[in-house]
């Protein structure tokens, strides 16, 4: 059965509250958490954008479940050597509990912070090269890297975890799916893209190209949910109004104020929530998890834009996760009996 995680949204909440929510998620029975890694929020009304690595360092003192980023861009505002150092240090602090999610980035973070940006083809090349450099540095060997975009001279990481931190690559299109399969230890995607056969085929092609068996690679997916009736979801929809057009219209826009204005003009609140899992009954949310599991998703992250995050966590802990744990136990017993 799929493992179920919770999204700690840096765009929408303060860091002290995110720590409290991470603790509460573990207590409720969630299997892991991820947090967004942004310089700015997608839209101005979201209101926050704390530094994700600081949160992970603090949160690890309070929880024991795995945690990571969803996702870090290791190509513009962060040099990949610094990403390698940061996550090696986190991995050493919290052995076997940290993962690094990476992606090709958004202009609200990269262009806004550095003035640099590029088309998708270059961003994909940068991402591939960055992951290669990160892995070389994680060997602990002296690294003289001379890539097209990144160079190091006599670089060596002196603090390393006993086991390398897994790298999961974000993708939502066929080209990025191939890249994720080829260069990643697993995939991060959205709940809609990850179930598309053509997307999964592209991921599998990339994995086999580098000699990996995609059947054994983790598939992480983010599922937007609302606990309650759809007519009550307006606040959450307003916070995530850009979402339907995120990768078609807004990924190249460095201005959260302009994105907010354009999203409000172009997208109705009903359009925002049409692909969300919405319901006040547990069965709606249980069926979503079972659907994702049947589609081969191994790690499903619940993302709710509701103001009352605690109520969402408690609902899942009380009404949803016990059912999933029971199904897991039944499956485990069946497998044991068959063996």
Image (cartoon, helix red, strand yellow):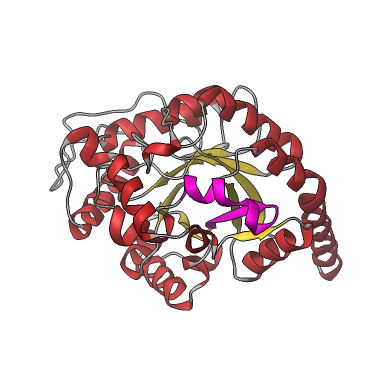
Which residue lies at the image location 57% right of the left edge and 60% below the top edge? 276
Q: How many marks?
A: 0
Per the rendered image, the range of residues in magenta is 219-240
Q: Is residue 37 visible?
A: no
Q: Does the magenta stretch include residue 1?
A: no
Work out which quarter of the rendered image holds the C terminus and state it: bottom right
Q: Residue 281 in the image: x percent, y percent?
A: 78, 58
Q: Residue 32 in the image: x percent, y percent?
A: 62, 42
Residue 297 relative to residue 246: left or right: right
Which residue lies at the image location 25% right of the left edge and 35% below the top edge? 77
Which residue lies at the image location 41% right of the left edge and 54% below the top edge? 170
The answer to which quarter of the image holds residue 19 is top right
Q: Residue 291 in the image: x percent, y percent?
A: 66, 68
Judging depth in this view, the residue of 133 and 98 nearest the camera is 98
Work out which quarter of the rendered image holds the N terminus and state it: bottom right
Q: Residue 10 in the image: x percent, y percent?
A: 47, 35
Above or below for 35 versus 232: above
Judging depth in this view, the residue of 244 and 86 nearest the camera is 244
Which residue lies at the image location 31% right of the left edge and 52% below the top edge? 262
Judging depth in this view, the residue of 22 and 151 nearest the camera is 22
Residue 123 relative to residue 318: left or right: left
Q: Does the magenta stretch include residue 230?
A: yes
Q: Is residue 190 visible?
A: yes
Above or below for 299 versus 69: below
Above or below for 198 versus 60: below
Residue 20 relative to residue 216: left or right: right
């Amino acid at each position: 059965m799929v493992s179920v995680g919770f999204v700690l949204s840096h765009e929408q909440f303060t860091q002290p509250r995110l720590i409290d929510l991470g603790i509460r998620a573990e207590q409720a029975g969630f299997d892991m958490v991820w947090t967004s890694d942004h310089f700015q929020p997608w839209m101005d009304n979201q209101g926050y954008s704390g530094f994700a690595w600081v949160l992970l360092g603090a949160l690890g003192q309070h929880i024991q479940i795995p945690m990571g980023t969803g996702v870090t861009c290791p190509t513009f505002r962060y040099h990949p050597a610094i990403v390698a150092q940061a996550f090696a240090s986190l991995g050493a602090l919290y052995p076997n509990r940290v993962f690094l999610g990476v992606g090709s980035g958004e202009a609200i973070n990269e262009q806004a912070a550095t003035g640099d940006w590029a088309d998708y083809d270059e961003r994909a090349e940068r991402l591939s090269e960055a992951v290669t450099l990160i892995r070389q540095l994680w060997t602990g060997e002296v690294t003289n890297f001379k890539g097209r975009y990144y160079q190091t001279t006599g670089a060596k990481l002196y603090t390393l975890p006993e086991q390398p931190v897994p790298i999961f690559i974000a993708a939502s299109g066929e080209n990025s799916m191939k890249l994720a399969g080829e260069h990643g230890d697993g995939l991060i995607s959205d709940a809609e893209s990850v179930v598309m056969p053509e997307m999964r085929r592209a991921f599998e092609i990339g994995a086999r190209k580098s000699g990996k068996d995609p059947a054994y690679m983790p598939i992480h997916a983010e599922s937007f949910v609302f606990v309650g009736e759809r007519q009550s979801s307006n606040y959450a929809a307003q916070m995530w109004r850009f979402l339907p057009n995120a990768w078609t219209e807004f990924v190249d826009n460095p201005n959260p104020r302009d994105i907010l204005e354009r999203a409000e003009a172009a997208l109705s609140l009903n359009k925002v929530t049409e692909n969300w899992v919405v319901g006040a009954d547990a069965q709606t949310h249980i069926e979503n998890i079972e659907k994702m599991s049947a589609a081969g998703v191994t790690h499903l992250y619940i993302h709710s834009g509701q103001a009352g995050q605690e109520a969402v966590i408690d609902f899942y802990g009380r009404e949803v996760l016990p059912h999933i744990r029971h199904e897991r136990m039944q499956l485990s017993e069946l497998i044991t009996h068959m063996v």
